[in-house]
Image (cartoon, grey):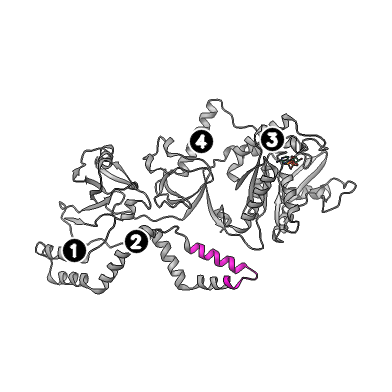
Amino acid sequence: MTAVMASGDSGSLSLGGLLSSLEKARVHLDSDEEDFGFLADLLKSRELQALVHVHNKINRTRKNCQPLMSNAEDIGISIMREIHYRTIPSADAIELFAILQSPHLQGVLQAHDSIAAKDFVPHLPEIPTEVDEDEETVKIVQLVKSNEPMGATIKQDEKTGAIVIARIMHGGAADRSGLIHVGDEVQEVNNLNVLGKTPNDVLKILMQAQGTITFKLLPAGSAAYLRESKVRVRAHFNYDPKDDKHIPCKEAGLPFKKSDILHIVTQEDPYWWQARREGDRNMRAGLIPSRQLQERRILAHRQEQAANGCILPKSPSCRPSPKIKKIIYDASESEDFDREEVATYEEVARLYPRPGLPRPVVLIGPPGVGRNELKRRLLALDPDKFRTPVPMTSRPPRPGEVNNRDYQFVSREELEEEAANGTLVEHGEFKGHLYGTSSITLKSMINAGYVVIVTPHYQALKYLRTAEFKPYVIYVKPPTLAVLKETREAAHARSTFDENNSRGFTEDEFKDMLKADARIEFHYSHWFDEVIVNDDLSSAFELLVAAVNRVETEPLWVPASWVQ
Ligand SMILES: Nc1ncnc2c1ncn2[C@@H]1O[C@H](COP(=O)(O)OP(=O)(O)OP(=O)(O)O)[C@@H](O)[C@H]1O
């Protein structure tokens, strides 16, 4: 039996047409009068006609009312949470809270998300009647060819040689038709039998076709309905399907850049996930390598590099800086850690600003790049708002130094105990004296509502980038050698490699800064929320102020585990 499922992409239903088909079919089928009567009454009923009328109206305007996201309910809850934590919410905020709390609006948001995620497919029970083995049910599907890709890939079934639908891209034309499913066998395209043809032959037919394309499909045994996952990840590498020899279909690939946020709509295939770029208005998902596949690729690439004698950027030669002169980190352990890390995708979620609990801002960068200068300027901008933890030292105070302003002066034993207890975010030793920054001081400043600015050694990121601190990490990057020389010389910058800060930077020190930059970026860039190039100091400072404002006011992507 051949069933006409829908006409074109517009998909308008006509009950009149169905009724007359039913009348025509009546003479050929030996079903009893009661069944026909029931079906005819149903098709004529005012309720069904009203429903079809609504369906057709929605269908006609469908192109202009695509959902932009599938997490409207989550956003509603986040807004309510934010209002709830406000000490004195405005009258408007209270009204908004009441609206968002109403069961009707919550129902609407839930329905919206279900529709956006296509979570509405009715699952009909299996037809219990016995079907004649020789009689095949096929479906005729018509799609209108446009500039938009069809949103499906095909492959040749290894056993039968038949052409079958391999993938349906979420949100693409095929998916939106709701009529084509993974595993469906393509029998004819525009009345051309494709039996014995290769996927390339079929693609040629499709490319040459104009206007409406008619497919005769043998439905898959059980149509796997597409349900979108809500997973978001941050990409830690650049990807261009054009350069990927192994992607099943280059046109179906989704290019992206490092740091892009991707909505992973399905991870069903272990090697090829389907994803959309967050905020991208294109509803059609594209193929990207799965975490498993990308990890394998990175490891294979590293092995190949090692075999060819290539080495990773070397550790920056840690010339002592006069503040915390020598940072104690177990170099061998960190090196192993760095090499083992295979950064592919990190699952993320939006963190909404929490009133009274600002996120600390961590400035990372190679020694001498200007992190402390930027921090000093920020502290001076608003001393009541910005704070930085005073480091601890076991060295005796120098004349003029004030306890808790310049340093917290403590005994060597106290500092050693803190280090042993793991309560220091970083610590080091210089000329026989210990230095360290207490995580307890850091935490209490955050809890007191200050925007805390810290400039730790880059290896301290491992201890700081946690759900406990939820830091916003900014990498302060040096400009090119020529710009470094020009700007630092013009400003009479003082070298931080000189203990007395009594001279400018040497050329070698600038070169060391750039080597350290390459190394830090190579190993830690996947932890940076933002990069600011410190070329012109006032422009870099402006960017920093803008970043700090964003952290305070906007929902930003953080590791998903921080939001639970
Ligand atoms: N964009 C810039 N242009 C000119 N001079 C700069 C710029 N940024 C920083 N400087 C100057 O460079 C010198 C070193 O800066 P700063 O002390 O902030 O380095 P740092 O990153 O804190 O170094 P370390 O990590 O080694 O302590 C200072 O004299 C500072 O004023």
| Percent position of residue 89, x then y | 62, 70
For badge 1, the amino acid type reads: Gly
Query: Dot 2: what SS?
Result: helix
Marks 3 and 2 in Cβ contact (< 8 Å): no
Q: Residues within 10 Å of mark 4 (few under 14, many from 20)?
A: few
Mark 4 or mark 3, earlier in chain: 4
For badge 2, the amino acid type reads: Thr
Q: Of discs 2 and 1, which sits in the foreground?
A: 2
Q: Nearer the viewer, residue 120 or 355?
A: 355
**What residue did someone put label 1 on?**
17
For badge 4, the amino acid type reads: Leu
- In the image, residue 246 lies in the stretch drawn in magenta: no
Query: Dot 3: what SS?
Result: helix
| Percent position of residue 223, x then y | 30, 54
Q: Of discs 4 and 3, which sits in the foreground?
A: 3
Q: Which quadrant holds residue 110? A: bottom left
Ligand 1's image quarter is top right
28 to the left or right of 414: left
Marks 2 and 4 in Cβ contact (< 8 Å): no
Q: Nearer the viewer, residue 127 or 202?
A: 202
Quadrant of image for the N terminus: bottom left
435 to the left or right of 329: right
Q: Which residues are magenta?
A: 73-93
Marks 2 and 1 in Cβ contact (< 8 Å): no
Distance from the alpha carbon under mark 3 to that under mark 1: 76 Å
Mark 2 or mark 4, earlier in chain: 2
**What residue did someone put label 3 on?**
484
Give the main secondary structure, helix, strand or loop, of the magenta stretch: helix
Query: Dot 1: what SS?
Result: helix
